[in-house]
Image: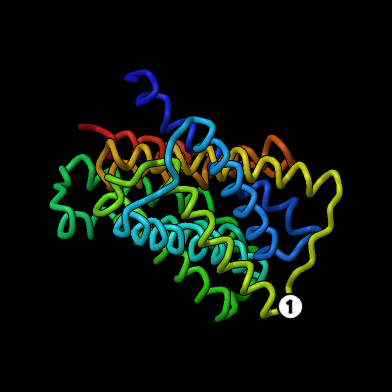
């Protein structure tokens, strides 16, 4: 168990950041919200089957069910839906990453008041250093950004609000929820909401080919099921600030993956930013 606690954060960062790479493939042949809805429906079904196979109950108390629904709406419908739709509306992925990377700062500040958590001087310095590193990694994207639409900005603010509130709710009211059953309902409610949105707006294009099928398989099995279970498990065992600080590593890790898979360049500034981000996260993780 101790070995899993040490390795879980780095496994989470690696596979969560791959979701942005998968999105690049998904956008080519599908409406993004509809793709997300199908992804979450499939993930909910698989997780329900796993729960039953392990002889665990899918029944939750009224309080745990309502908490799961609230967390699911915030984390999956608002955050994932907001980021993906913002990029589809024209927001550069770099700017989207910077805006949503404010989440660890917001969570840490709110957690001091809401959860009674305390930030040490090392953690405050780490949060500042991590945010600075993320901006250094993504700053070149601003030069190529063009204009940010009002709709895209609103969607990103909604995504930031969703991820922040989901993290705080999981820590405040989600610690008693059975992990598998609770996550199943999270996926299901978000899938329903995003599916209704897709039907209402008429954005229901989904072209099945080898590329989209592989993207869906990775999105369901790895970035939905494995990554989300790791995130929720870590939140039940560590402070909200420490877990949220890991999200600082997502944009730099995504940049490295894009360099490896798509040949996107990493300049010296980006490399320095990655090092600063890693150091910042290490300071926040310091007990």
Residue 142 versus residue 233: which sits nearer the camera? 233
Quadrant position of the C terminus in the picture: top left
Quadrant position of the N terminus in the picture: top left
Which residue is at a point 67% across and 39% down the rendered structure image?
259
Going by the image, does 280 lie left or right of 148? Answer: left
Point out residue 8 in the picture as x, y percentages from the top left corner: 42, 29
Question: Mark 1 highlights which residue?
Answer: 202
Vertical order, 202 against 156 (above or below): below
Residue 267 visible in the picture: no
In the picture, residue 235 is in which quadrant? Answer: top left
| Extreme-right residue of the structure | 209
Point out residue 63 in the picture as x, y percentages from the top left corner: 29, 58
Residue 202 versus residue 117: which sits nearer the camera? 202
Which residue is at a point 49% across and 30% down the rendered structure image?
54
Point out residue 73 in the picture as x, y percentages from the top left corner: 46, 63
Point out residue 246 in the picture as x, y percentages from the top left corner: 39, 41
Going by the image, does 153 lie left or right of 18? Answer: left
How many numbered tags mark residues here? 1
Residue 4 visible in the picture: yes
Which residue is at a point 40% across and 41% down the rendered structure image?
179
What SS does tag 1 mark? loop
Going by the image, does 118 lie left or right of 189? Answer: left
Label 1 Cα crowd, 10 Å radius (few <14 / some 14-19 / many 20+): few
**Snapshot colouring:** rainbow
């Amino acid at each position: 168990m101790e070995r899993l606690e040490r390795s879980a954060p780095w496994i989470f960062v690696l596979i969560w950041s791959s979701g942005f790479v998968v999105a690049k493939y998904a956008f080519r042949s599908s409406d993004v919200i509809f793709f997300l809805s199908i992804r979450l429906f499939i993930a909910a079904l698989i997780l329900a089957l796993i729960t039953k196979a392990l002889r665990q109950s899918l029944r939750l108390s009224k309080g745990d069910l309502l908490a799961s629904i609230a967390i699911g709406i915030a984390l999956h419908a608002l955050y994932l839906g907001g980021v993906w739709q913002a990029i589809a509306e024209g927001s550069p992925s770099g700017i989207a990453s910077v805006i949503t990377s404010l989440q660890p700062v917001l969570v840490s500040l709110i957690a001091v008041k809401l959860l009674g958590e305390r930030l040490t001087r090392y953690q405050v310095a780490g949060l500042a250093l991590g945010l600075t590193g993320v901006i250094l990694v993504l700053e070149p994207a601003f030069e190529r950004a063009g204009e940010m639409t009002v709709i895209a900005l609103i969607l990103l603010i909604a995504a930031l609000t969703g991820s922040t509130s989901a993290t705080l709710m999981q820590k405040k009211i989600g610690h008693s929820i059975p992990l598998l059953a609770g996550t199943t309902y999270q996926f299901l409610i978000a899938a329903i909401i995003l599916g209704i949105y897709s039907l209402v707006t008429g954005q229901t294009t989904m072209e099945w080919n080898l590329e989209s099928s592989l993207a869906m398989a990775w999105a369901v099995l790895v970035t939905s099921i494995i990554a989300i279970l790791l995130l929720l498990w870590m939140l039940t065992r560590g402070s909200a600030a420490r877990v949220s600080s890991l999200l600082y590593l997502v944009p730099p890790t995504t940049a490295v993956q894009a360099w490896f898979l798509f040949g996107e360049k990493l300049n010296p500034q980006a490399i320095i930013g990655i090092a600063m981000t890693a150091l910042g996260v290490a300071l926040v993780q310091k007990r």
